[in-house]
Amino acid sequence: ENSPYETIRGYLQASSNHSEYRGQHGSSLNSAAVHYENGEFSLPVRLDVGDFFASQSRRTLQRGLKGFQLEFQPKNLSTSQSIQLFWGRSAENYDTFFDEKKDYYFGGSWLIDTSRAGAFALTSVSYDDGTKQGNENVTSLAWEKSLNAVSFNHTLEAEFAYLSGENTLNSDLNGHSEFFHLTGIGDAGKNYLLSYERNNREFTPTGAAQSPDRETIDVQWGQYFYTRMNMLLRGQRYRDGLSTNNHQTTQLYGVNVVGLPFKKYPLNVNAD
């Protein structure tokens, strides 16, 4: 660390195996990374080279990659902005990273944070496995806005994603996903969550952890009591196979109580 606004750090992790009872013999470089950050530049930058976690959004890309990720934040604009670009492969180690297979992820995101309308993020992620059956792109537009009303601090999130291209199962992908999420924190420990998500059958982005052909509804209410106790009521409904004649519905209801019920005794309760 050269200054409070400039940081550089890195690490290496390697393994060596010479046992007859454990897999392939030899040594390999499992992971390595260099992180550089400088906020004193006229264009503040953050750079990761090697291993990094590509966290765009749950509907586009959530995966550890080997490659690079560059983020910079333009100054002297009327709104706060951040632009991120990345390229990488999902490889177990650097032996497989440099093999002949040509699968990789690449893309970027553009975040704009306004004071009145909220924050907007446009994300585009492409995946190419080097074949005609493995070339896809998922693009999403996300929005987040916080506001105070009725003694609650509310946060509203929404994301709309579209998947195109082709994979081994579909030569003309037409996938889409819709997501709405509302949370609130009020006085006296009150809090709530309302969430809705729907993915159609063809929404199967390679780098995202999503369940296709599913609709999810999640409702939660939390309340503090006895000062140090919290109770959470929740209800969830999952509908799978929406495009089929044999769709299934799963409903879950629960109550969770956690905290310290006794002031004189350090007894922690967690019942679900």
Image (cartoon, rainbow, N blue to C red):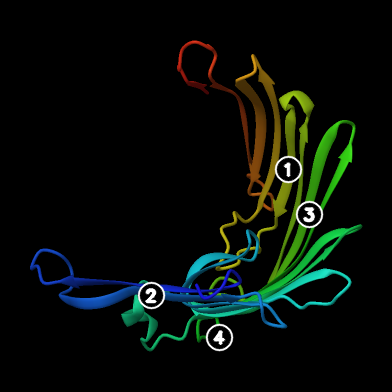
- Residue drawn at x 25%, y 77% as measured from the top left: 28
Residue 74 in which image quadrant: bottom right
Q: Please, is residue 60 above or below residue 247 in the view?
A: below
10 Å neighbourhood of mark 1: few (<14), some, or many (≥20)?
Answer: some
Residue designated by label 4: 132
Q: Is residue 135 visible?
A: no
| Cα gap from disc 3 to disc 1, whole angstroms | 10 Å
Residue designated by label 3: 158
SS at circle 4: loop
Q: Earlier in the sequence, mark 3 or mark 2?
A: 2
Q: Does residue 117 appear to the left or right of 38 in the view shown?
A: right
Residue designated by label 2: 32
- Residue drawn at x 86%, y 45% as measured from the top left: 147
Type of the residue with mark 3: Ala
Q: Does residue 38 appear to the left or right of 200 in the view shown?
A: left
| Cα gap from disc 4 to disc 2, whole angstroms | 31 Å
Q: Is residue 94 visible?
A: yes
Q: Earlier in the sequence, mark 3 or mark 1?
A: 3
Q: Does residue 225 appear to the left or right of 187 in the view shown?
A: left
10 Å neighbourhood of mark 3: few (<14), some, or many (≥20)?
Answer: some
SS at circle 2: strand
Which-is-in-front pick, marks 2 and 1? 2
Q: Residue furthest left?
A: 20
Q: Earlier in the sequence, mark 4 or mark 2?
A: 2
| Cα gap from disc 1 to disc 4, whole angstroms | 37 Å
Type of the residue with mark 2: Ala
Residue 126 in which image quadrant: bottom right
Image disc number at residue 195: 1
